[in-house]
Amino acid sequence: MSVRATARIVARAGGALPVLESDGPLAVRRTRAREPGTARVTVVGAMSAPLGGDRLALEARAGDGAHLTVDAAAATVSLPGPTGATAHYDVRLAAGERARLVWLPEQLIAANGSSLRMRTTVELAATARLVLREEQVLGRTDEEPGTLLTRLTVRRAGRPLLDQELACGPGAPGGWDGPAVLAGHRAVGQLLVVDGAFEAEPVVPRQLGATAVLTPLAGPAALVTAL
């Protein structure tokens, strides 16, 4: 039987968490913050998920002036379900004026035979700051990957800042593993930083080793992508 579940987090200035709701396999727990007056929440898996056919969602909002960090206790493993259906996992993030939102999940692992569509959407106020990390691992040790479709959409002050999609694994469009995309690698990740300071001092695009690159974005933001 497939699972439908949504977890919700709302942070206010000063470190308050007026909303901290868990559902199904998504358990959210307040953990010790590194700075006073800030909030930190850790996502703890209450059961194996997502399985094929599941529809999961996590919503996190940092209100005006709030500083919120959301991390995870372990990797998320996409697993095949009994029917072969695709699982869906939606992450919806938002940060208000003068807010800081840090989204640091552990790796997303696409196990052999699984099928997952993951969508992350972020809405930022004009003065909000964001640190967002995403990592995808295609298959566990010595196994072929599952099918994984991920999309990241970020808007700042109502305007598009970043919108990108990656499809890989069986059934994905041809060429996903070619030299123009993953080039045989089995892990891909990105780190996105949105900060008004980049308006005065934008980052300089450059290569970071053989399989990583730093790219400035109009927004202002900086994106690191690595294989």
Image (tube, rainbow, N blue to C red):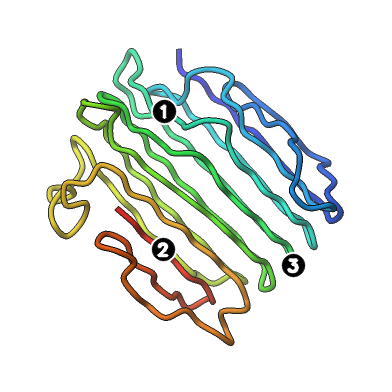
Q: Earlier in the sequence, mark 2 or mark 3?
A: 3
Mark number for residue 9?
none
Residue found at x 22% / y 46%:
185
Q: Position of residue 65 (x, y in %)?
A: 80, 62
Residue found at x 44% / y 54%:
152
Q: Earlier in the sequence, mark 1 or mark 2?
A: 1
The amino acid type, in three-letter code, at marker 1 is Val
Q: Position of residue 204 (x, y in %)?
A: 42, 81
Quarter of the image holding residue 53?
A: top left
Mark number for residue 77?
1
Relative to 91, say whether 83 is above or below. above
The amino acid type, in three-letter code, at marker 3 is Glu
Q: Earlier in the sequence, mark 3 or mark 1?
A: 1
Quarter of the image holding residue 139?
A: top left
Seen from the viewer's position, the closer of residues 86 and 48 is 48
Question: Which residue lies under the disc numbered 3?
Answer: 97
Q: Quadrant of the N terminus?
A: top left
Calculate the distance from the C-alpha at mark 3 to the C-alpha at mark 1.
Answer: 34 Å
Badge 2: how crowded within 10 Å, few (<14), some, or many (20+)?
some
Seen from the viewer's position, the closer of residues 106 and 17 is 106
